[in-house]
Image (tube, grey):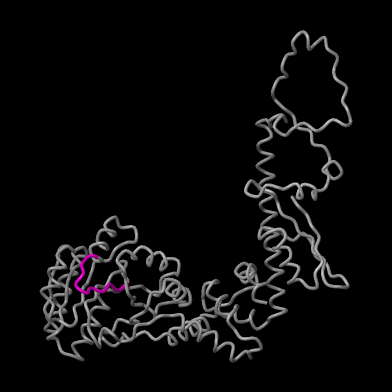
Amino acid sequence: MKITRLVAPDMRHALRAVRDQLGRHAVILSSRPIPNGVEVTAAIDFDADHPPTEADLAAVPDPQATLQPVLVRSTRAPRPLDAEAARSPAPTPSRAAAPAPVAEAPLASEEDAPLSSTMETELKTLRRMLETQLARLAWNDLARRAPLHAEMLRELTEVGLMPELAAEVVRALPAGAQPTLARRLVLATVAQKLLVTGDRWLQEGGRIALVGPTGVGKSTVLAKLAVRWALLHGTRDLALVAADSVRMGAQDQMQSLGQLLGAPVYALEAFGELPALLARLGSRRLVLIDTPGSSQRDAQLAGRLAALAAAGGGLETALVLAASTQAGAIAETVARFAPAGPTSCVLTKVDEAASLGGTLSVLVRARLPISYVSEGQRVPEDLRPARALELVSSAVQLAQTSGAAADEDLLNRRFGDVAHALA
């Protein structure tokens, strides 16, 4: 372990100096105010990835002066001496003799293993405690030096935004901004990062295959789009494709919708038939394709997605996501359905979501535009084109309604590493 003492005009400069000299894994052992600023004692462990240099070893305190000797009992029997060695007198130890190399030290016995494991566990626990203390000091310093930035980070955390996105947005705040203006700028910046397509499908048409996990509402979204199109343009240029041969009754449901609207419905047993069908439907302005819902770990999912991506014919894939799902599951869904090459997504069950910030963060990071938002089961009323600022405002309202709060421990863990860069 290398221990060093640093003096700086304030804690922010001290933390930066610790990071520059000892690296990002350094821990604060103690800190105290002095007349000219603060004095910080920091340390870093040596490990296999960062072997100590000669200068590092020179800075380590003498273990003979600081540690008491430790007796280790060995279960191994001593080696017998040969005759000549037995007759030779024992060598007299010399004070100037160099210490024995580490490689020649006796190996620890099996009885020592529990002690070593316990010490390793305790060191890891101590390190986590020191890292937590360092993060708390950094966050407290940010709250003191830049209270507006700290407050905006707190509010964005309550909305549910991921830490990386929240820090990026707050970092762009202009110096000296008033709280009301800062709050508007933060929300506007989040909205600018959120991509939307507008009401393109219902205005221009297209060939859209709706894909996504089971139970997210693909068939309901398709019905809402089809009825909206029929009300705006009639059914002459509309065609429905029932490609879900997995769920029982799915194709019958599509046939019923087609009869209700007076629009043709084409049933497919395999995605391999899709290119030929799209060629036959070249004159139709809007072709809506219902696909089977798939678990993210479905063994056949990759094959179906590859077939969709290779269908051609101007086919556009839209990923349907349930906003009521946790952000981690949505991120996994986006990654699993990426081979289909989705160009946009549809958010469903927005009315059932407890928080929207995590979902919006995933879509911002994936650069996946949102086409439509569905909130409710009414056909076709509960469907509207996605608007970025409305979604951000809905996320804020949800956080306020649910009483979401971010405690100090959560803020320390999330922003302790970046607090010095934001101050």
| Quadrant hosting residue 169 | bottom right
Count the marks: 0
**Span of residues in magenta:** 310-319
Is the C terminus in the top left, top right, bottom left or bottom right quadrant?
A: bottom right
| Quadrant hosting residue 209 | bottom left
* Residue closest to the eye, 72 or 47: 47
- Residue 15: image x %, image y %? 72, 67
Reply yes or no: does residue 317 show up in magenta.
yes
* Residue closest to the eye, 38 or 236: 38
Q: Compared with residue 123, is residue 188 higher up or lower down, i.e. above or below?
A: below
- Residue 95: image x %, image y %? 89, 31
Q: Is residue 2 left or right of residue 68?
A: left
Q: Compared with residue 370, is residue 69 higher up or lower down, i.e. above or below?
A: above
Q: Is residue 319 left or right of residue 138?
A: left
Give the residue at x 39% y 86%: 387
Reply yes or no: does residue 304 show up in magenta.
no
Give the residue at x 18% y 68%: 243
- Residue 395: image x %, image y %? 47, 82
Q: Compared with residue 234, is residue 248 higher up or lower down, i.e. above or below?
A: above
